[in-house]
Image (cartoon, grey):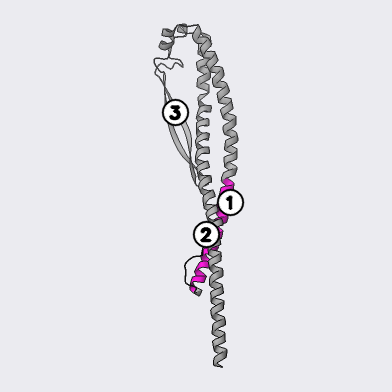
């Protein structure tokens, strides 16, 4: 390890000892932060995996039901069913702070049309399978939103864990050993200077 290029004086020695103390304290805090981030991250990964499986299973089932329901109608009728939306959906986001990581929290606000119908078409224009499939897809919206929120949290927290890990390693394997070696070198130089001074005093006597 290359030591710092500093003059071996007592003042510099005291400054280096203060820096070493601060570096060790920072190292401990960063390790604690990294460990806590990892704990949150593991919990989010588990939730993400469970949510993704649920959403994918429901989507596959709904798509199969939709294909079946669509086969009972002609294509022109299907296009007409979805031509005009009956609700306006707005997405807004809050920012949550988890261990200095700013993660999103998604919310939706729905605005219904003046007619107040849940569907944009007449029930006579479709079949019960189509109605049920559309209702199932609408019910899935909250889970989709939560999945997007959790996946974004996982991404942001993974980036922060990597940054924290690099800082911990930098302190542990570079800065702290460099400071310790420089302190040891200065202490040796000061002891050598004290011995030389003592020898000169003895010679004078």
Task: Give the spatial CA distance, label 3 vs label 2.
Answer: 51 Å
Q: Is residue 13 magenta?
A: yes
Q: Which image quadrant: the C terminus?
A: bottom right
Tag 3–tag 2 contact (CB < 8 Å): no
The one of 20 and 132 positioned closer to us in this rendering: 20
Q: Sequence-wise, which precedes: disc 3 or disc 2?
A: 3
Residue 1 falls in image quadrant: bottom right
Q: Is residue 158 left or right of residue 117?
A: right
Under circle 1, the secondary element is helix
Q: Which residue does the numbered mark 3 point to in the structure image? A: 109
Tag 1–tag 2 contact (CB < 8 Å): no
Q: Is residue 11 above or below residue 20?
A: below
Q: Which residue does the numbered mark 1 point to in the structure image? A: 32
Could you say which disc has been placed on residue 40 in the image?
A: none
Q: Is residue 17 in view?
A: no
Q: Is residue 55 above or below residue 196?
A: above
- Residue 104 location (% of width, % of height): 47, 37
The one of 29 and 86 positioned closer to us in this rendering: 29
Question: Which residue: 52% across, 52% down?
Answer: 167
The stretch in magenta equals 11-36
Under circle 2, the secondary element is helix
- Residue 166 location (% of width, % of height): 52, 50
Task: Give the spatial CA distance, label 1 vs label 3.
Answer: 38 Å
For the stretch drawn in magenta, what is the main secondary structure?
A: helix
Q: Which residue does the numbered mark 2 point to in the structure image? A: 175
Under circle 3, the secondary element is strand
């Amino acid at each position: 390890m290359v030591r710092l290029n500093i003059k071996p004086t007592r003042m510099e020695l005291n400054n280096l000892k203060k820096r070493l103390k601060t570096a060790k304290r920072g190292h401990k805090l960063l390790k604690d932060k990294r460990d806590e981030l990892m704990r949150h991250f593991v919990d989010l990964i588990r939730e993400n995996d469970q949510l993704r499986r649920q959403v994918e299973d429901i989507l596959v089932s709904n798509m199969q039901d939709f294909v079946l329901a669509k086969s009972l109608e002609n294509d022109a009728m299907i296009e007409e069913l979805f031509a005009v939306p009956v609700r306006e959906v707005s997405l807004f986001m809050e920012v949550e702070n988890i261990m200095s990581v700013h993660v999103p929290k998604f919310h939706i606000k729905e605005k219904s049309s003046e007619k107040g119908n849940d569907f944009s078409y007449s029930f006579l224009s479709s079949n019960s399978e189509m109605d049920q499939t559309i209702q199932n897809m609408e019910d899935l919206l909250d889970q989709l939103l939560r999945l997007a929120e959790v996946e974004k949290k996982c991404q942001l927290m993974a980036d922060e864990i990597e940054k924290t890990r690099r800082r911990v390693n930098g302190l542990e394997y570079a800065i702290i050993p460099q400071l310790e070696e420089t302190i040891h070198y200065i202490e040796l130089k000061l002891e050598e200077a004290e011995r030389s001074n003592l020898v000169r005093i003895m010679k004078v006597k």
